[in-house]
Image (tube, helix red, strand yellow):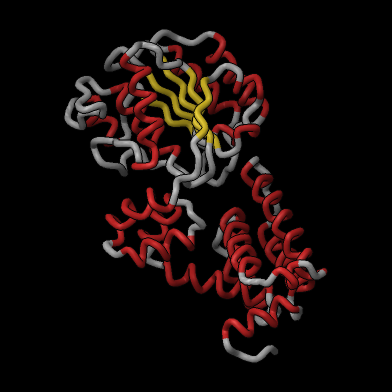
């Protein structure tokens, strides 16, 4: 997902579950030991890009206060508007899932130029594991010959999706998924109600930034409806032909995420004896296949959306629908099987 550099508060603070990492980065900066190449790695939708933005703004701020950017100097005003000339935020172009070589070459050229406003320049790559091989090779030049006072912050979802030649030249920080107890108070400030926060975090499978987007989404009820429909398909209760059109305007990654969430929720509702059956094992194989497909899409694969949606729904219904899984679902919902 793209980062709106102008869509955040003037002062960028780390998220509550990132305080330990932030203190480490701040200490390195104060000691003059902050590495010129930093790689933030961790699960998707846990706030890594938000941490990278906070660090970038701190590095560019003329008058930091309390360990954060001040939000008032000219540099902070430019950062808040998304127009700071010494900040390069590199991400896949619209309708693309890959950071391409031409983008990296322009960014490397940016890094080699003199700072326009202060003494530092910052380049952020998000997500770094979306670079193709040519782009990664082009980036090596900036890593092997770093310009003075230029900082490179790479953000990735899959550490091994970043080439070893890149990883070896960065200080790696592995961010773990936050605990529910760390996320809920933060979500409460958005929802105003603990029960809604808990529901959003459950729907987002523990990923707080996805929960935030769902909270801001006026169509959250449609999200629930989509997942219910997908569960119905997997249980053999809803025809594929009625569900596939729901995803005509949803990107491939979004469809795979919705389907995997529905499948995993369904699996969690089954008894151990059910999961040991042929159909139960088929559910685990389908989950593994969805994980593989999501990784392929994140790496730049671009399958035909309509064909992929229809084929994987048909497969799921064929292997799972009308089985003990659907019988169990019917019992939970209190309605007879069809």
* Outermost residue, left side: 72
User: Quick check: 55 left or right of 226?
Assistant: left
Q: Is residue 103 above or below residue 287?
A: above
Q: Residue at x 64, y 84 (%)?
A: 330
Residue 300 or residue 325, whichever sits in front: 325
Number of labelled discs?
0
Q: Residue at x 42, y 65 (%)?
A: 199
Residue 336 at what x, y percent from top left? 65, 91
Q: Is residue 333 above or below residue 217?
A: below
User: Quick check: 111 left or right of 43?
Assistant: left
User: Quick check: 216 left or right of 48?
Assistant: left
Residue 272 or residue 122, whichever sits in front: 272
Identify the image quadrant of the C terminus.
bottom right
Q: Is residue 120 above or below residue 178?
A: above
Residue 314 or residue 6, whichever sits in front: 314
Residue 278 at what x, y percent from top left? 82, 69
* Outermost residue, front side: 272
Residue 101 or residue 165, whichever sits in front: 165
Corner quadrant of residue 288: bottom right
Corner quadrant of residue 136: top right
Residue 142 at what x, y percent from top left? 53, 15
Residue 294 at what x, y percent from top left? 65, 50
Q: Residue at x 68, y 72 (%)?
A: 271
Q: Is residue 89 above or below residue 304?
A: above
Q: Residue at x 76, y 58 (%)?
A: 285
């Amino acid at each position: 997902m793209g980062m709106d550099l102008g869509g955040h508060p003037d002062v960028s603070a780390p998220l509550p579950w990132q305080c330990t990492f932030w203190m480490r980065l701040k200490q390195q900066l104060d000691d003059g030991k902050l590495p010129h190449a930093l790689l933030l790695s961790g699960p998707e939708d846990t706030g890594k890009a938000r941490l990278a933005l906070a660090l970038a703004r701190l590095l560019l701020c003329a008058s930091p206060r309390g360990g954060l950017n001040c939000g008032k100097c000219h540099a902070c005003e430019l950062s808040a508007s998304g127009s700071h000339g010494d900040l390069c935020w590199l991400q896949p172009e619209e309708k693309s899932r890959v950071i391409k070589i031409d983008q990296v070459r322009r960014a490397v050229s940016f890094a080699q130029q003199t700072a326009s406003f202060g003494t530092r320049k910052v380049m952020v790559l998000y997500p770094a594991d979306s670079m193709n091989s040519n782009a990664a090779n082009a980036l090596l030049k900036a890593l092997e010959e770093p310009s003075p006072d230029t900082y490179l912050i790479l953000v990735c979802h899959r550490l091994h999706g970043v080439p070893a030649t890149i990883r070896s030249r960065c200080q790696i920080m592995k961010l773990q998924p936050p605990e529910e107890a760390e996320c809920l108070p933060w979500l409460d400030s958005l929802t105003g109600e603990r029960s809604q926060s808990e529901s959003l975090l459950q729907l987002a499978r523990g990923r707080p930034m996805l929960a935030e987007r769902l909270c801001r989404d006026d169509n959250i009820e449609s999200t629930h409806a989509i997942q219910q429909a997908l569960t119905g398909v997997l249980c053999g209760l809803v025809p594929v032909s009625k569900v596939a059109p729901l995803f005509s305007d949803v990107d491939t990654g979004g469809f795979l995420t919705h389907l995997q969430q529905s499948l995993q929720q369904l699996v969690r509702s089954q008894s151990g004896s059910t999961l040991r059956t042929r159909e139960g094992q088929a559910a685990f194989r389908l989950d593994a296949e969805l994980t593989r497909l999501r990784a392929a899409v994140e790496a730049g694969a671009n399958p035909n959306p309509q064909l992929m949606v229809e084929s994987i729904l048909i497969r799921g219904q064929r292997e799972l629908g009308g089985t003990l899984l659907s019988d169990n679902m019917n019992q939970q919902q209190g309605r007879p099987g069809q």
